[in-house]
Image: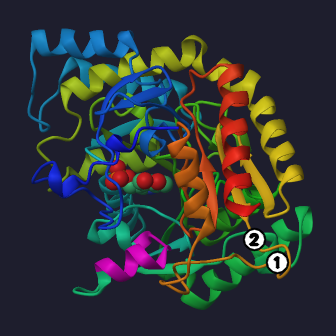
Amino acid sequence: MKSNDSAIKLDELSSNIPHWYDPEGDGVPLTEGCGATVTDAAGDSYLDFVSSLYCVNAGHDDQRIIEAITDQLGRIPYVSSAKENDARARLADALADVAPEPLTDVTFSVSGSEANELAIQIARESQDAPKVLTRWQSYHGSTYGAASLTGDPETRNAVQSHAATTGGVKFLPPLPDVFDAEGAELAEKAADHVEFVIRNEGPDSIAAIVIEPVAGSSGGFPAPPGYFERLRELCDEYDILLIADEVITGFGRCGEMFGMQTEGVDPDMITFAKGVTSSYVPLGGVLMREAIADRVRDGGTAVGQTFAGHPVACAAGLAALEAYEDGLIDNVQSLAPVLREELEALAERHDVVAEVRGRGFLWGVVVEDPETGEPFANAWVDDDAENPVEDVAEAARDAGLLVGVGRPNFQLLVAPPLCIDESDIYDAVETLDEAFTAVFE
Ligand SMILES: Cc1ncc(COP(=O)(O)O)c(C=O)c1O
């Protein structure tokens, strides 16, 4: 058990207003990290099975990345984003090398939201069409443009309540409950639905489909086999760009460098952030096909951001890519089956765990009332309902394990850093098991 001293309220601590601020939250200030472990101000340690925000992929103290950052600071800390810089150019080349083959060029941003905004700016310009299709429930960021893509109604409603966002069209995710089907039948029905939406919106009005290869904060669910192949065919048939949002799924999280490589389907663009530097320094960006890049280069660009492709971040990115290729992705490939088996065994032991689903080191644990087959609570439907899923996450945290709560919040998310070992998995799932027991039995 953790000492209660660690539950310091943030308003007792500083003038900082955190993002996703919860006035009822305990605001435990984290002050140190090592490998897959973080330590709070009271000295209590936690196994971080959510990689902070699904982003510290290399763990909390990878010396290769830290040294690269320090070296870059010693050479030149900042270079205008309108100019070339060696670290920036080398990272762009390295990303193109590890990306799906048709993606040859990169433009950088600062965050994942801005990467998605950049991608849709480029897509709209390139296709001369205003609309972008995304999945209902998805998360693509919370700035105005990115929030218009986000299908999670909580984020979208918060952003749209004071200003309209335009061009976002939603389609339903390929989930068994939504289409009352599984496997190949689900892939077919869900893809037919996307085609229905395309035809109704008017194919010529659609610039792109933006989609995560495996759902991130919305629940760790992969698409059924064949779904992405059909999306690719639809995009080709209707002349729509397929953009993979790999802000969470990129950089080894799903067992390959990029999540689309686990699907074997090439997108036209990939947006990335988070894991590109293991989040040691902010960086995002867009990988794109040569034909799209040629159009961007030919026309020049009229917009930019001061911090896009910051040299310190690019140096961190180069070192992080090496770390992923030097064993961390192999580690995901060898331990993912253990994580899967352990989570499936957890589901066997607790009848409130309706389903576990995921790929690599990105898993959702769905919680339902076994009597009704419905979630105990879903804040998007009823804001005030008591949510035992949050109690489970809290009980786990009190016992020294951090996991995520999904959006919608009837599920837990398990996404450890890629550097964990087998015993971390056993420890984490045992703690989760005890937390389920404490809350439900
Ligand atoms: C899939 C996905 N896309 C985009 C974003 C937005 O990234 P950022 O928070 O860096 O703006 C997130 C953030 O969690 C994400 O999960």
Hey, what amino acid is under mark 1?
Gly
Is 38 situated left or right of 118 in this image?
Answer: right
**Residue 368: numbered disc:** 2
Dot 2 and dot 1 residues touching (CB under 8 Å): yes
Q: Which residues are magenta?
A: 149-159
Name the one closer to the observer, 291 or 394: 394
Q: Is residue 264 visible?
A: no
Secondary structure state at the residue bearing disc 2: loop
Q: Position of residue 131 (x, y in %)?
A: 44, 78
Name the one closer to the observer, 112 or 47: 47
Q: Which residue appears at 71% of the width and 45% of the height?
A: 434
Q: Is residue 104 visible?
A: yes
Label 1 Cα neighbours within 10 Å, binned few <14 / some 14-19 / many ≥20: few
Q: Where is the C terminus found, in terms of image quarters?
A: bottom right
| Among the 4 quarters of the image, the one containing residue 186 | bottom right
204 lies above or below 263: below
Residue 402 colored in magenta in the image: no
Colour scheme in the image?
Answer: rainbow
Q: How many marks?
A: 2
Q: Quadrant of ligand 1?
A: bottom left
* Residue picked out by circle 1: 373
Instruction: Tell me the distance, in whole angstroms, between the alpha carbons under discs 2 and 1.
Output: 6 Å
**Residue 435: numbered disc:** none
What secondary structure characterizes most of the magenta part?
A: helix
Q: Which residue appears at 87% of the width and 50% of the height?
A: 349
